[in-house]
Amino acid sequence: MTRISIPAAPRPEDDLRTVVQTRTREWHFHIYFLLQSPTETAAALALRDAVLRLRRDGAFVAVPLHRVNEYPIGPHPAGSYEIHLAARDALPSNSKNARRFYANNLSSILIHPLTSEQRRDHETRNGWLGTPWPIYLDSLPTKSDEAPLQYPELRLGWSTAPEEEISLDERRRRGAEVEALLARDPEAAPAPVDS
């Protein structure tokens, strides 16, 4: 008889300090479009303009690169452009325009975190709205010493000054406050009691 052993599932991380230090701080959205399609190109650029208007009006901080790629570049196989978002502005509130773009079947959007492991970010830590496209990973570094800083003048994401970070004690206080508010809601699951 053959015996099959199943490895134990890894335990989810629940140490506050580790989770805070390793959290995703920034996201990239890569909007792909077929350059041969005037309809797709126009829709992609209209989405970019909508994001720029909403940023101007204070809805969120999103930074589309000035450059729109009119040919494959880096790992990206088609016409594309990038939108940079700090995690505080990324999801889900700002995905309505992206969902509308996808709902019109006008291409695909690659979404990935920005960390010191750019290849992994594009290869396994990604998500797609629309049909995934093959991407050329050989052009990406496997590991860097730090996440690349983008728009440090905004002081968001990886560029947040340490004094602007929420302390662990403040996070615990806010967490206890949320738990107390939800304790009266029968639909909300309570946090486990630590022994």
Image: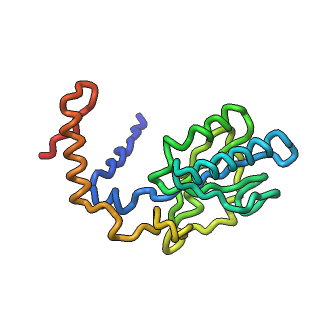
Residue at horizontal 46 percent and vertical 67 percent from the top: 155
Which residue occupies the extreme left position in the image? 195
Residue 158 rendering spot, x and y as whole percentages: 46, 66
Residue at horizontal 74 percent and vertical 37 percent from the top: 106
Residue 156 rendering spot, x and y as whole percentages: 46, 63
On the picture, is 141 further left or further right than 184? right
From the viewer's side, name the closer residue of 172 and 136. 172
Residue 68 rendering spot, x and y as whole percentages: 75, 58
Residue 31 rendering spot, x and y as whole percentages: 69, 49
Q: Colour scheme in the image? A: rainbow
Please identify the quadrant where the N terminus is shown.
top left
Which residue occupies the extreme bottom position in the image? 145
Placement of 110 over or under 117, stated as above or below? above
Residue at horizontal 67 percent and vertical 32 percent from the top: 103
On the picture, is 118 further left or further right than 170? right
Q: On the image, which quarter does residue 95 sit in?
A: top right
